[in-house]
Image (cartoon, grey):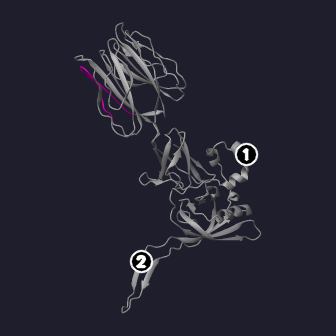
Amino acid sequence: MTLTYLDDLGRVRIELSGVLDGFALIERSTNQIYWETVRGGAALPVVGGAATLYDYEFAANTENFYRVSITSDASAYELVGVGSAATSASTTGPLLVPMPGGVQAGDLVFIYASAEIGTVNQPAGYSTVVDTGHSKVFLLGASGQPPAPQLTVTGGASNGSFIAQAAVWRGPFPSFEGIDTRTASDASRILTPGLEISTPRCLVLLGGWRNGTWSGSPTLPPGSTLLGNAPGSQSGQVWSWLEQEAASNIGASQFGGLNPMIGAATEAFVVAIAPAGSTSDTQSITPALGGCEIWLKSVRFPSLNQAVTIADYSPLSQPGRVGVFNVEGRSFPVGVTDVAGAYSAEITLVADTAEQARKLSLSLAVGDLFYLQVSPDGNPQLPPRSMYVVVSDTNIARLGVEEKRHITVSVQEVAQPAPQLAGATLTWGTVLDRYGRWPQLMNAEPSWTDLLAVVGSPEDLVVI
């Protein structure tokens, strides 16, 4: 998630990238205790791993925290292919590891390799994910179809099994949810450790090595799919994978059914790989109003948003809601009370030019809900706080022979509208005025995403 403040309409741009397709919940907080949903962010569609949302109702000149949570039915990782296992009865190397075809830039290439004698060296460009001693797992973020790497061993010998196999997945670049290893001696199985998992849709790899060969295919840990079974000449390795859809732990398990071999040394691993940033993220930004102390923002039509200057405002009026009823035969009446009403006031705005006065007049004529955003700097000339308002009456006064106008509006504070009520920066009036015909529109804005980024003007609103 990337946050950027844009002063054109007084908005924070929230950009998501590299996330799962589905729906995003985007929330805002100033203390990370109380969170509220950003307008339009209750179920923001994520397509192609990306989405953009604009927040106009942030707390000005204050650190705002934004968090995103993704809900998706899509699988995070897709198995592209598995190469054939390379085996050798000698660990002197080198060993060429076949690579499956169809690898694209951004794919994740894993190699599981083991040496009965000596230590497998990390191939160039790869990183080591797991090291159990005799076996290792290497990872490469592909930039295209990679060449088949040659593996070497330090301290090898002419009489030890050397095995390696590659598998490739497509999905978001990972962060590691957890890794665990286990060494043991067991006659007919390779025990795999358990792992705590708190992130959904993790790619889980399980593997085991035994100092001793076997015949046939071992039984696999529950729910996993075999990647490769290579018994080797004197030692062997086997590995499998699964996608852990729920954020639930992986229990200890085993690769079982191996030929009994009393006291055989075994090594096993489990690694859970979470799609980094694809399910949740929290970032912060401090949007500075840049010298402007107040914004008038339309909830439905953000293209009307503009910084305004206040000349004056009347005392804030808050009506009481009480009733007094006389009772026959009693001196004292009965009082019926309720919470006080919302504030109302008259606010005088300043337009320095006739054009500014026209733009402001057109914006007010829409009759929308407005967000009166006030800088929290304690200026006594400003209203005491930000509020949602409706505008009832408007009066425009010319100041002598100057172009400057005073626009006095009667405002009534109202409840904050639900976050599902989201505006757009253009209307069909914008489309008709700018492009006229579909061919011109498609040439200028090839996609709906491009079109939705266009900012209209008060002249575009068809209701004017």
Say left or right for 291 vs 42. Answer: right
Residue range of the region highlighted in magenta in the rendering: 177-195
Local crowd size for mark 2, using a 10 Å CA cut-off: few (<14), some (14–19), many (≥20): few
Q: Residue furthest top?
A: 158
Sequence order check: which comes first, mark 2 or mark 1? Answer: 2
Residue 322, given in percent of the width and then of the height, sits at: 44, 79
Q: Which amino acid does label 1 sit on?
A: Gln
Instruction: Give the SS element for disc 2.
Output: strand
Q: Is residue 243 magenta?
A: no
Check the image and report above or below for 84 versus 40. Answer: above
Q: Is residue 194 magenta?
A: yes
Rendered view: 432 above or below 151: below
Q: In this view, does 191 lie above or below 8?
A: above
Name the side, left or right, on which 126 lies relative to 195: right
- Residue picked out by circle 1: 440
Nearest to the observer: residue 205 or residue 293: 205
Q: Please provide percent x and percent y for residue 220.
A: 33, 27
Which residue is the site of mark 2? Answer: 337
Is residue 171 rendered to the left or right of residue 244?
A: right
Q: Residue at x 37, y 24 (%)?
A: 239
Q: Which residue lies furthest to the left in this view?
A: 262
